[in-house]
């Protein structure tokens, strides 16, 4: 199989300090050896990412993760055994072998084992820590296909492992285990409820899209995961009015609804009412609008319930509130 020889090439490229774009179950990552400063610098350059925003480090499994965490509490064991490989990043005190650039000078490192066969094979062959943010230009939507990565980054990397479309479609949950109780810094593919079932009560960084919390997890500021089009969110009650106002305009707009479409307008796109399926298609749907040169996107907010927490978080980061913008 071609992809297996690609994995061997990818491992050599990483050892030589190069950049490899890799598939995960959440989104594609842009990877480099987390112990090599020059290699990690290339990631920041390719993405145009500010060096104040720390990178997640990918590992094959718990035993490799333990090599890079200076402290490994009982909760980490429980969570890694239950959720890895999978969409959960654990923030723990770091060892010095992880270069400071990876963690933006912090004393902690975010570790996760991604659940994708190609990338797990790569991590086993490379046998090191793989620094890997999402493989998009900084502040743009995370890529969920290899083509998205090529469209965003051109040839700013040495090799891409094409693992097909990502199954989960939004990023991992980032959980800080250095606080008591542990804190969700970014909701994602593993829910609060799932985590609490394993380790008991945790807290969620509230108002995480506000600027003042940027110091805790710098990727958490507003408009971090945005399409190129101007994008606005609205509440379900406003849907009828939005359709009436915009569905028949000449301008290239798109209206994204949760409920099944009753309007036949080609401008109206209805999403799945299942949060898992919605998450899987969210970024690719928004990118599709960018490809179609849509200028304005209006997105209906899903219900304010735990099952929708991660999707609501990403919509908030991708949009401005429509009613606020009209004031
Ligand atoms: O699903 C994912 O997590 C994807 C795939 C590629 O694994 N990666 C990803 O990486 O989304 P990135 O760099 O786009 O987002 C990492 C997030 C940022 O919000 C960053 O601030 C936070 O994790 N983070 C990383 N290390 C941290 C640390 N030591 N302390 C606090 N936050 C951290
Ligand atoms: Mg990202």
Image: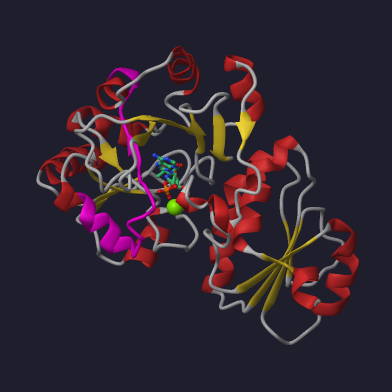
Please check the rendered image and state whether residue 320 is part of the magenta-colored stretch, yes or no: no
x, y percent for residue 63: 29, 17
Q: Position of residue 135 (x, y in %)?
A: 37, 54
Quarter-of-image position of residue 89? top left
Residue at image coords 77%, 39%: 305
Q: Depth check: 66 or 211 in front?
A: 211
Left or right of 201 in this view: 235? right
Q: Is residue 40 above or below residue 63?
A: below
Front-most of residues 140 and 288 = 140
Residue nearer the viewer, 87 or 9: 87
Farthest bottom residue? 250
| Residue 247 seen | no
Question: Considering the image in quadrants, where does the N terminus appear?
Answer: top left
Is 138 located above or below residue 117 in the figure? below
Quick one: quadrant of the C terminus?
Answer: bottom right
Would residue 56 be counted in the magenta stretch?
Answer: yes
Q: Residue at x 85, y 67 (%)?
A: 263
Q: Residue at left 48%, top 16%?
A: 75
Looking at the rendering, which quadrant does residue 84 occupy? top left
Q: Is residue 303 left or right of residue 241?
A: left
x and y percent of residue 66 in the render?
30, 20
Whether residue 178 appears in this view of the structure is yes
- Colour scheme: secondary structure
In the image, the segment drawn in magenta is: 40-63
Residue 292: horizontal and vertical position, in percent?
A: 56, 75
């Amino acid at each position: 199989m071609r992809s297996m020889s690609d994995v061997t090439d990818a491992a050599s490229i990483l050892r030589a300090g190069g950049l490899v774009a890799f598939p995960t179950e959440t989104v594609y990552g842009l990877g480099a050896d987390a112990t090599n400063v020059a290699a990690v610098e290339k990631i920041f350059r390719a993405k145009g990412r500010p060096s104040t925003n720390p990178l997640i480090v990918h590992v094959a499994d718990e035993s490799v993760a333990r090599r890079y965490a200076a402290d490994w509490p009982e909760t980490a064991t429980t969570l890694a055994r239950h959720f890895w490989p999978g969409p959960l990043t654990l923030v723990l005190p770091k060892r010095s072998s992880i270069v400071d650039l990876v963690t933006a000078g912090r004393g902690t490192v975010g570790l996760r084992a991604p659940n994708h066969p190609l990338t797990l094979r790569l991590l086993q062959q490379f046998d090191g820590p793989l620094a890997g943010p999402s493989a998009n230009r900084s502040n743009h939507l995370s890529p969920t296909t290899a083509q998205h990565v090529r469209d965003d980054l051109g040839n700013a990397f040495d090799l891409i492992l094409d693992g097909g479309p990502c199954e989960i479609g939004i990023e991992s949950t980032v959980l800080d285990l250095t606080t008591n109780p542990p804190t969700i810094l970014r909701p994602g593919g593993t829910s609060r409820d799932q985590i609490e079932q394993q380790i008991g009560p945790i807290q969620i960084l509230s108002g995480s899209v506000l600027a003042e919390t940027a110091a805790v997890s710098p990727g958490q500021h507003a408009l971090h995961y945005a399409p190129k089009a101007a994008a606005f969110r609205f509440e379900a009650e406003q849907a009828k009015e939005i359709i009436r106002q915009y569905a028949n305009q000449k301008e290239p707009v798109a209206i994204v609804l949760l409920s099944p479409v009753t309007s036949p307008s080609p401008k109206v796109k209805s999403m799945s009412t299942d949060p898992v399926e919605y998450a899987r298609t969210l970024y690719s749907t928004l990118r599709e609008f960018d490809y179609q040169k849509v200028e304005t996107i209006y997105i209906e907010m899903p219900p304010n319930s735990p099952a929708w927490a991660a999707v609501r978080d990403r919509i908030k980061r991708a949009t401005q509130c429509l009613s606020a913008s009209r004031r």
